[in-house]
Amino acid sequence: MSRSLAELARDAIELPQQQRLTLARILLDASDASSVEPLPEIEAAWENEIAQRIRAIDAGQVQGKPWDSVLADINKRFTW
């Protein structure tokens, strides 16, 4: 019997956090996209973005959000 994607996602969301992270890693590792070499200009753009965000945090212009709060927001958004 084949399960729908919605059923699989619902079950995956109900897993404990560590198991959800493990499942995500398994799916990412199995993805063909993970074997694609990133383009240098995209990598440079991400490095620039990361550096800008770090500077903004260091300068007190923005404030981080606690990890538990981020996870709660994700769970609210993706809970059916």
Image (cartoon, rainbow, N blue to C red):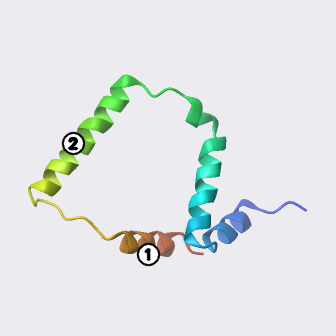
Can you identify the residue that label 1 sits on?
72
Q: Nearer the viewer, residue 1 or 29?
A: 29
Task: Name which residue lies at 37% across and 74% down.
Answer: 69
Q: Give above or below for 41 relative to 13.
A: above
- Of helix, strand and loop, which one carries label 1? helix
Q: Residue at x 86, y 60 (%)?
A: 2
Residue 1 placement (x, y as % from top left): 91, 62
Q: Residue 41 got which mark?
A: none
Residue 16 vertical placement versus 20 (above, below): below
Horizontal placement of 4 versus 17: left or right? right
Q: Nearer the viewer, residue 17 or 6?
A: 17
Residue at 56 percent of width and 60 percent of height: 21
Question: Where is 19 relative to 37, above or below?
Answer: below
The quarter of the picture where the C terminus appears is bottom right
Give the residue pinned by disc 2: 51
Using the numbered discs, state the Cα–Cα distance from disc 1 to disc 2 in whole angstroms. 27 Å
Residue 4 percent location from the top left of the image: 77, 62
Q: Amino acid at mark 2?
A: Ala
